Image: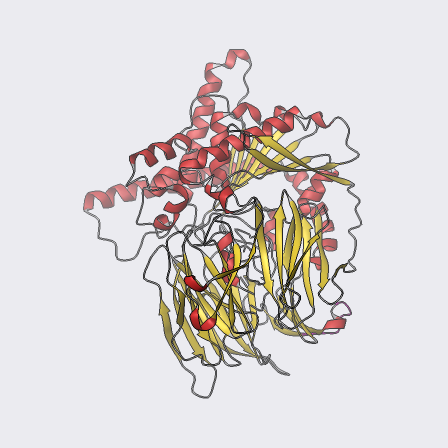
Amino acid sequence: SCVALRNLLQGLSFSVRYYSKHNHIQTTCLYSKIKPKKCHMLDCSEGTCTHKTLPSGSILPWRFFSCKEGTKIPSKRKQNTSIVSELLYKNLLKSEQENWKDISARYKPMTKRIKEKLEELHKYTFSSGNPRIRFGENVYFEKNGCIFLSKADDVNEGNVDILFSTEDLGFFDAFIQRIRISPDQRYMAISLKSENSEEATCVIMKLGHFPVVQKVIPNVFSFEWATNDVLYYTSQKNLKCQNVFMTTFTNQKHTKLVYTEQDARFFVDIHCTKDRRFLTINSNSKTTSEVWLVDCRYPSKLPALVQARIKGVIYHIEHRNDELYILTTYGEPAEYKLMKAPVASSGMENWQLVYALEEKTKLVDLEMFSDHCIMFLKNAGHLYLSVISFVSHSVQSIKLPTWACEFELESHPEHTTSTCYFQLTSPVHPPKRFAYSFKENNLIEQAVQEVPIITNCHTTRLLAKSKDETLVPITVFHNMNSKELHRKPLLVHVYGAYGIDLNMSFKEENLMLIEEGWILAYCHVRGGGELGLSWHKDGCQHNKLKGLHDLKACIMLLHKLGFSQPKYTALAAASAGGVLAGALCNTDPELIRAMVLQAPFVDVLNTMMKTHLPLTIEEQEEWGNPLADEKCMKYIKSYCPYQNIKTQYYPSVFITAYENDQRIPLTGVLRYVQKLRKAALDHASRTRKKGNWIPNIILDIQANGSHCESSWEDSLNE
């Protein structure tokens, strides 16, 4: 499997503002290179958030807002100004915390009821969603901060060995993010992450009757075993990964630097091909990539370049029978296609087409096996498989259950296996395990414990016509027993950035809302990746307003079709989704009654003007460069939520922010809340005689937690 791929499709350079809050181990596959880093998942080879998450994949590297080291010492006047600003900030922070304390007390009975309900649901849904690593008869999996080893047939029988426990080793506030097992299963590398920090710590265990810690490496992002006792890893600093190291566990233990990326726009990670022949060093920006190969037979040799980077061309590598299989955007149309080339002559001039995607089809994941390649695809909201046989040179398409919205591929370290395991899920369906047999050529649903709560949930897929006539997909969930849907509360979700799909993975709170009569709607607006790379391109930089027009069209269609009405409609968004949600709140506030934002990005212009922030240059490919282009500055200013607050009606707003968030600066969120409150109050004072109401604008600043994932307990408390 190819980790770099999944990372790319969901973020590419990992500066993505994406939010994912559910605890699971990362699984890997070729698409892991195109998919954003989401959540924590167990994989023997990939990396999601997770942004987040979050879904299959790996950690999303959102913006880090602290200054670089080595800044000049400010003048005395600037120092005094800084001291005053810091005092104002502290006073404002304290005021907001006290305000939240008073407000939250009103909701204690409701909070208690919701928490009890979610805990009940979690008991029945948690066990079904643990990704597994299969090594022959051995199965490795994570649960509750422990890593277990079991025989394939005994996973659910309780006959398991504990290999690792975060608490036993003193990592009390950490969760397991990623796992890699060495080819001979003598070593296990684990990354541990605290929810208050972006950086992860890699712990290498020597397995046996009594597993022992062999080495601890701080500030690690990705890592892979080249051989039984040689580990490659990337180091992370200020959300950037630009160095690759090799460390050995032979008698002559040593560590050395093997690769450095010089371009600040690029983010480096590593991946192991499915047949374990090569490690790939993947250097990706949001639009361009370059891959270097490390031959696992000779891990000390210098990496070899596959194809020098070409602006606008993304590619990722797998290997089979002395041929490189290349997932790339090269050629027309500029969507992903599978190509191949000999290892000995891997240049672009030798790439041959193997498989091209249909129009408006999204490649969600890809896994290579000895005689087959299996692709997980999304078209018009439906998931299906395309299975390529290298023996019969045929392609078979298998449609997956209509309720499925997301899937997560389980790790298959042995590329000769005859079965591919994966999980399907939706916002209201807990993960279900499926297997595709290459021998039998069929899909098998694995036995799973049913959730003892019947929601009778109906799924509807709609298309809204946007301002420019583009059809925008919407996925709607509601209880089939609900009557008078126009009187039911509606929760609309939106994201629309970085080419990342709106998170459609299961959450217990969705089941609870459906059961209580809510309608859930997911708007797949441009800027996201639901309809392929062109869908993202049509909603970034100078096309950002298209995502806003899409969102407005979606909400208006929902109301027109009788799904709720404005006074019962809430809009939810996280991270970069806050741009479109906040913009709609300014342009069409009458469409919604409430807005819920989590770690929102609401001040695009000021952020993109500050090039000293580590990820600003990378993100110019998403938002544009206002410093170099006056048109770009005016365009960002036209939709930026903070810049466009005005004295008018506003819905109630609830924002969760994090004191230690390295991606979204708390100062910006505080400014946004203050300006929004003033505008709403000014409007209310001018229209008081007309009986105008004053919206609640609430800010909950979490002392713990960060922009990335959190434990189930912390997520539950939120």
- Residue found at x 42% / y 38%: 670
| Residue 447 in sight in this render | yes
Magenta span main SS? loop
Colouring used for the render? secondary structure
> Between residues 342 and 685, which one lies in front from this camera angle?
342
Left or right placement of residue 73 versus residue 32 in this view: left
**Which quarter shows the N terminus?**
bottom right
Q: Is residue 129 above or below residue 136?
A: above
> Between residues 682 and 528, which one lies in front from this camera angle?
528
Q: Quadrant of residue 293?
A: bottom left
Q: Which residues are magenta?
A: 156-161
Q: Is residue 193 above or below residue 94?
A: below
- Residue found at x 42% / y 28%: 645
The residue most toward the bottom is 251
Place of residue 671 in the rendered image (x, y in percent of width and height, measured from the top left): 40, 36
Q: Is residue 132 rendered magenta in the image?
A: no
| Residue 106 in sight in this render | no
- Residue found at x 40% / y 38%: 603
The residue most toward the top is 689
Place of residue 322 in the rendered image (x, y in percent of width and height, measured from the top left): 52, 74
Left or right placement of residue 403 versus residue 33 in this view: right
Q: Quadrant of residue 514?
A: top right
> Between residues 423 and 165, which one lies in front from this camera angle?
423
Place of residue 8 in the rendered image (x, y in percent of width and height, measured from the top left): 48, 55
